[in-house]
Image (spheres, rainbow, N blue to C red):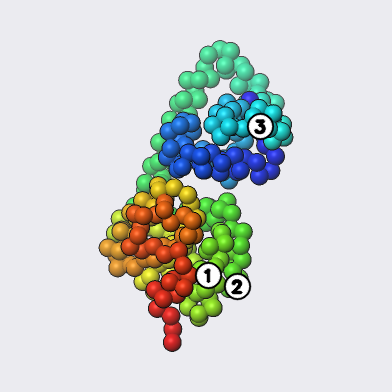
């Protein structure tokens, strides 16, 4: 069975579970839910299975009564299939061919998809990363509008964008930048300086950012990371680059005279 939750409730559930676990890595280890599935749930792209819903609600300590109140309706496992597809599926399951065919199909699809990604990354890296970015941006939740008129993801990014705009800086928002090993989309770029803004709780994000910055530094890029003051304790690994104060951020950026 799958559960269709009321709008916004699945996103809240994942946020509460991540907060209790302390990091996505710990949540994955505790619940057994893959990282990509957590991403889909967080963005309410998939309905959640009844089993996983039970695991998450019990993990954060939600009572059964409260958990049931957030459910809009329950759907059968094959709810998205048309009637003919359902009948075909039932027949194949009865004669024992469905599982073998399904595994074969998934293995072939996965192999072909991995090969395509590998080929595109190698032969057309810029086009590949820009295309993946465009796909992500469609579901990325860009809700806030800056004074310059662009959409950004959160209030911290908006404050930084407005500060740069107010000071007349010709910044780029989420441009494609090549490191020595990978391509990245830092939050802001001014010349050879990048500014990363994060409101994520947990040390895992700090270490991911550190590896990204170290790779970009080898390509001649400087970095500043800004986080809310209450989250500074999660980002000790980035202390060299870190600030929580906008006055300090202004001093570290080379403002035009």
25 vs 154, left or right, is left
* Picture disc at residue 152: none
Q: Which residue is mark 3?
A: 67
Is residue 158 visible in the rendered image? The answer is yes
Describe the element under mark 1 as helix, strand or loop.
helix
Check disc 1: other Cα within 10 Å, few if <14, some if 14-19, many if 20+: many
Q: Residue at x 60, y 73 (%)?
A: 147
**Which-is-in-front pick, marks 3 and 2?**
3
For the point 43% across and 80% down, which residue is it? 255
Q: Is residue 165 depicted above or below 196 in this figure?
A: below
How many C-alpha atoms fall within 10 Å of the one at disc 3: few (<14), some, or many (≥20)? some
Asked if disc 2 and disc 1 are in contact, CB closer than 8 Å, the reply is: yes
Q: Is residue 213 above or below residue 85?
A: below
Q: Where is residue 207 drawn, in percent x and y?
A: 36, 51
Image quadrant containing the C terminus = bottom left
**Residue at the far top in the pictured view:** 95
Q: Mark 2 = which residue?
A: 147
Marks 3 and 1 sit apart, C-alpha to C-alpha, by 39 Å
| Residue at image location 48% in from the left, 31% down from the top | 31
Q: Position of residue 226 (x, y in %)?
A: 44, 63
**Pointers 3 and 2 in contact (CB under 8 A)?**
no
The answer to whether mark 3 and mark 1 are in CB contact below 8 A is no
150 or 129, nearer to the observer: 150
The first of marks 3 and 1 along the sequence is: 3
Residue 172 in the image, given as x and y percentages of width and height = 47, 70
Q: Residue furthest bottom?
A: 257
Can you tell which quarter of the image residue 129 is in?
bottom left
89 to 150, vertically: above or below: above
Q: Is residue 65 above or below residue 221?
A: above
Q: Considering the image in quadrants, where does the N terminus appear?
A: top right
Q: Label 1 belongs to which residue?
A: 161
Residue under the image location 69 percent in, 28 percent down = 65
């Amino acid at each position: 069975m799958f559960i269709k939750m009321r709008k916004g409730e699945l996103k809240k559930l994942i946020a509460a579970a991540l907060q209790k676990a302390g990091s996505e890595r710990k949540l994955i280890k505790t619940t057994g839910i893959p990282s990509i599935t957590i991403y889909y749930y967080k963005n309410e792209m998939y309905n959640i299975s009844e089993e996983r819903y039970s695991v998450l609600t019990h993990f954060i300590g939600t009572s059964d009564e409260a958990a049931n109140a957030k459910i809009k309706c329950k759907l059968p496992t094959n709810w998205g299939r048309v009637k003919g597809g359902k009948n075909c599926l039932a027949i194949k399951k009865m004669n024992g061919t469905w599982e073998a065919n399904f595994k074969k199909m998934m293995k072939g699809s996965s192999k072909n998809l991995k090969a395509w990604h590998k080929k595109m990354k190698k032969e057309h890296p810029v086009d590949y990363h820009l295309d993946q970015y465009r796909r992500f941006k469609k579901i990325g939740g860009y809700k806030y509008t800056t004074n310059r008129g662009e959409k950004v993801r959160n209030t911290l990014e908006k404050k930084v964008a407005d500060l740069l705009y107010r000071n007349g800086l010709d910044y780029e928002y989420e441009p494609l930048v090549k490191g020595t090993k990978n391509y990245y989309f830092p939050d802001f770029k001014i010349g050879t300086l990048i500014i990363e803004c994060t409101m994520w709780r947990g040390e895992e994000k700090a270490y991911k950012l550190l590896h990204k910055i170290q790779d970009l530094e080898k390509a001649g890029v400087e970095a500043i990371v800004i986080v809310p003051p209450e989250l500074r304790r999660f980002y000790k690994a980035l202390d060299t680059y870190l600030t929580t104060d906008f006055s300090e951020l202004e001093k570290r950026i080379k403002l035009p005279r």
